[in-house]
Image (cartoon, rainbow, N blue to C red):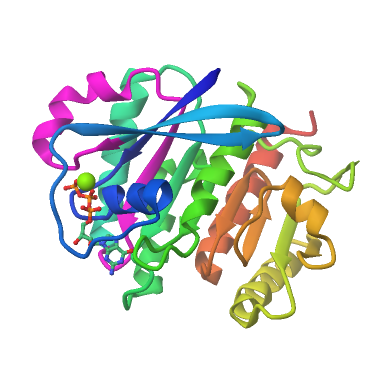
């Protein structure tokens, strides 16, 4: 059976173990017990009709374990970088983990940034500024805003990776004009933007307003998919939670803010300009 290795990285206490426990056992504990070294969890997921084993490596965030990075990062097929949304400084460490990963894996793999603990009060503006500073921002394929405690948007992380595993090619990460296929029609726009929502999603509205403002600045059009009336498209794209926004080669799950979305549109737009019209 096809088996993919996913490594989960980030500072101590950001909630790596909690996210995995929520996904694998649908459980959450308020108490904190640091992970010593690493633990491996296995789960099976159905990918376009095929069973795929996900081997999820929960890596202890303490500094001491970085020494053994080679042992757990080798042959990773995907990485989830976890930060605590209530502690913007935890974002900085993602850069360090990404460098470690780059030393050990010599190919491009799917990478997701996960902001955990959205159930707690947080300063989105501070987080947006951090993301704007991130050098590795352009390498990431997805951002998910989630909570291990409530379970919100947790399953999306893994469904997003599952979808990436089916479509991943070595050149992935470079947006191609025809990457996004909706209704069996290739999207021909320079940076395709697709917004998934439905009538009852009131919390989607501010995100939608932001996306529209940005799209009009860049003269891009937004395709809006109502997941109730166009359920087949949502399923095909692996959309579980709302709002989900696809911008070029990146997917953003949850309530992000305008600054973050703008920096992502800018990145994708620049990439298209640089890579030309292949
Ligand atoms: N409110 C809230 N607390 C959370 C959430 N996720 C994790 N926590 C708490 O944060 C603490 C740390 O969670 P862990 O999952 O153990 O953190 P970790 O990243 O695995 O830490 P290390 O193993 O030391 O690297 C625990 O007390 C959890 O209960 C969340 O989404 N919301
Ligand atoms: Mg842990």
User: Measuring 39% from the left and 63% from the top, which residue is drawn there?
Assistant: 147
Q: Quadrant of residue 130?
A: bottom left
Residue 175 visible in the current orientation: yes
User: Measuring 51% from the left and 62% from the top, which residue is drawn there?
Assistant: 260
Q: Is residue 28 left or right of residue 192?
A: left
User: Measuring 39% from the left and 58% from the top, which residue is drawn there?
Assistant: 115
Residue 236 point in image, percent of width and height:
75, 46
Residue 267 point in image, percent of width and height:
58, 48
Query: Which corner quadrant holds the N terminus?
Result: top right
| 17 versus 167 height, above or below | below
Q: Identify which residue, 24 or 235, lies in the foreground.
A: 24
Residue 191 visible in the current orientation: no
Q: Is residue 45 left or right of residue 68?
A: right
| 204 versus 145 height, above or below | below
Q: Identify which residue, 233 or 222, lies in the foreground.
A: 233
Query: Which corner quadrant holds the C terminus?
Result: top right
Residue 55 point in image, percent of width and height:
41, 29
| 259 versus 62 height, above or below | below
Q: Quadrant of residue 240?
A: bottom right
Q: Is residue 145 left or right of residue 266?
A: left
User: Measuring 57% from the left and 62% from the top, which residue is drawn there?
Assistant: 261
Q: Identify which residue, 198 or 142, lies in the foreground.
A: 198
Q: How many marks?
A: 0
The question of residue 72 being in magenta is answered with yes
Range of magenta residues: 58-87
């Amino acid at each position: 059976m096809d088996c993919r290795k996913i490594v989960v990285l980030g500072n101590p206490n950001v909630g790596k173990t909690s996210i995995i426990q929520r996904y694998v056992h649908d459980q959450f504990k308020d108490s904190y017990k640091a992970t010593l070294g690493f633990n491996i969890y296995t789960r099976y997921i159905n990918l376009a009709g095929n069973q795929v084993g996900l081997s999820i490596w929960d890596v202890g965030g303490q500094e001491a374990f970085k020494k053994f990075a080679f042992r757990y990062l080798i042959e990773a097929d995907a990485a989830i970088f976890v930060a605590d949304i209530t502690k913007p400084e935890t974002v900085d460490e993602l850069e360090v983990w990404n460098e470690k990963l780059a030393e050990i894996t010599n190919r491009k793999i799917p990478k997701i940034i996960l902001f955990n603990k959205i159930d707690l009060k947080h300063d989105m503006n501070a987080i947006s500024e951090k993301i704007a500073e991130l050098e590795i921002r352009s390498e990431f394929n997805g951002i998910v805003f989630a909570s291990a405690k409530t379970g919100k948007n947790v399953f999306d992380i893994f469904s997003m990776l599952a979808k990436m595993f089916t479509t991943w090619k070595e050149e992935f990460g470079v947006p191609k004009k025809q990457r996004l296929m909706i209704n069996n029609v290739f999207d021909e726009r320079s940076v395709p933007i697709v917004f998934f929502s439905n009538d009852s999603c009131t919390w989607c509205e501010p995100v939608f307003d932001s996306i529209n403002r940005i799209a009009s600045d860049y003269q891009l059009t937004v395709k809006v998919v109502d997941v109730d009336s166009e359920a087949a498209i949502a399923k095909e794209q692996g959309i579980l939670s709302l709002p989900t926004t696809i911008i070029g080669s990146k997917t953003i799950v949850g309530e992000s803010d305008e600054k973050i979305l703008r920096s992502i549109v800018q990145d994708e737009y620049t990439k298209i300009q640089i890579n030309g019209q292949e």
